[in-house]
Amino acid sequence: MSRDRRAELHPAPGGLPDAGALGRRPRTAVVGGGIAGLTAATGLAERGVEVTVFEREQHLGGRAGGWAERLPDGTAVTMSRGFHAFFRQYYNLRALLARTDPGLRRLTPVPDYPLIDALGRTDTFAGLPRTPPLNALAFALRSPTFRARDLLRLDGRRALPLAGVGVPRVYDQLDHVDAATFLSAINFPAAARHLAFDVFSRSFFADPGELSAAELATMFHLYFLGSAEGLLFDVPTEPFPQALWNPLGDYLTARRADIRTGVSVTSIELRPGGFLVDGEFFDAVVLACDVPGLRRVVADSPGLGTADWRDAIARLRTAPPFVVRRLWLDRPVDAARPAFLGTGGLRPLDNISVLDRYEGEARRWAGRHGGSVVELHAYAAGADTARVSHDLDGLLHQLYPETAGARVLGSSTLVREDCPLFPVGGFAHRPAVETPQSGLLLAGDAIRVDLPVALMERAATTGWTAANTLLRGWGLAGHPLRSVPNHGRIALFDRLAARTGRLSAHR
């Protein structure tokens, strides 16, 4: 449930409650079993639409999924692509998870996530007021890197879009400038930038110099000035498959959805009244792939869409590689260490997670071995995995000295380069949920939806939107959406921000 009384409800389209009333149940292929695809599949299956999910991996969940690995002693463990924060303003993602966990008891709150810089200065989010703008003001005033006089030095006129974010308006104002340049232009202090905005920009696995300032402003609105849900978040109590996706897969199967893992869709053929996918006819298709997968499918399906739309798909970019390194250590980290620590100015390290603080599988392993399970992230990392891993370990030992003498009983290091990049000027070409091809929809965190959402919440929101679009076309009832307000919380600032045109990147 939302704790923010100003959260916006976007009502569901009306219609019939079940596709059985249509005489013939429509068949839909959902290509991709990540958050976006599972959300679309849920929205359709709950209305009696026949759904087939095609997922190239052997597991569900996409970039928030997990899979089985074994430690050197043969112990079975679950590995994933790393830590994910389930913020309380992720209304549409949490609505999906509530299908199998109505009380969201398989999520547990993280009491704080400190941010530390290279000089040891630390910010925290615990105990802040939830109401904007008091939350951001309190954070700034108690921060060791943000002095009171820094507030006076901020260029209020240039910073107005932060106080009055509306989507898509903020993209008209800021999409032409990168996040780093924008922060410099508004006189945001450099030290605080490392501990606040850089942390958010690297949530997109991108350097602030490559990320659109509009995307950063949208995130700032989502977490700070647009929402009264607070800045803390929840994490799953068990690995992603056990806590989230296996139950949802069972939920879908119980609603006659056909889930096919380990099946890669390479192309889609147009047919009269529908599409041919993997040799089968479907009335509609939802492409919920990651960026590389979406580009491949569209490139190998020459009959789909228009030339301009296909070009927009081809222009989608991925962020630089990121590294996740997980260590199973023979001794515990200090009991005072937080479950999650963000870093600024300590490249290549972006954060440290102590999994046994919150995840059941890791906690049980740590209890049996008297050790700990630690995860290190490096976003926008270089291609030299060995060097990055070495540097990550060194920074772990520097920040958590008790780990320096620990024996590594197991380790897993993975590198991926498939997260979407939101570059300067990219919004004008970003593909939307609806496509020029009737019956073909897109979903995913790279897809445009004109609501203030990001990351996993954008994936879920586009999934519900794709399902609603198809359901509306068949005369079936849709599903409601929620979001933080799509405008500033303070009416005066919002009106002023609305009058602000495209901002110059330079003073």
Image (cartoon, rainbow, N blue to C red):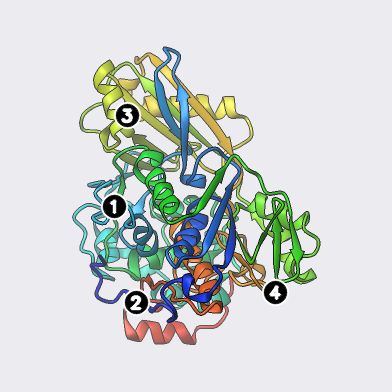
Q: Residues within 10 Å of mark 4 (few under 14, many from 20)?
A: some
Q: Is there CB contact under 8 Å for labels 3 and 4?
A: no
> In the image, which is nearer the foreground, mark 1 or mark 3?
1
Q: Give the residue pinned by disc 3.
A: 362
Sequence-wise first label, 1 or 3: 1
Q: Amino acid at mark 4?
A: Pro
Whole-Å distance between the Cαs marked 4 and 1? 37 Å
The first of marks 4 and 1 along the sequence is 1
- What's the residue type where badge 3 is placed? Ala
Residue at the front extreme? Answer: 23
Identified at 44% across, 41% down, the residue is: 350
Identified at 47% across, 57% down, the residue is 455
Q: Is residue 5 above or below residue 33?
A: below
Position of the C terminus by quadrant: bottom right
Q: Helix or strand or loop: what does disc 2 sit on?
A: strand
Q: Residues within 10 Å of mark 3 (few under 14, many from 20)?
A: many
SS label for mark 3: helix
* Residue 257 in the image, given as x and y percentages of width and height: 49, 54
Residue at image coords 63%, 43%: 263
Residue corresponding to mark 2: 8
Residue at the spot of label 1: 101
Q: Is residue 379 above or below residue 98?
A: above
Is residue 458 rendered to the left or right of residue 317? Answer: left
Question: How far from the left and from the top, in percent, is residue 193?
Answer: 42, 55
At mark 1, the secondary structure is: loop
Closest to the observer, 125 or 141: 125
> Which residue position holds label 4?
436
The numbered mark, 4 or 2, whose residue comes first in the sequence reads: 2
Q: Quadrant of residue 355?
A: top left
Q: Quarter holding the N terminus?
A: bottom left
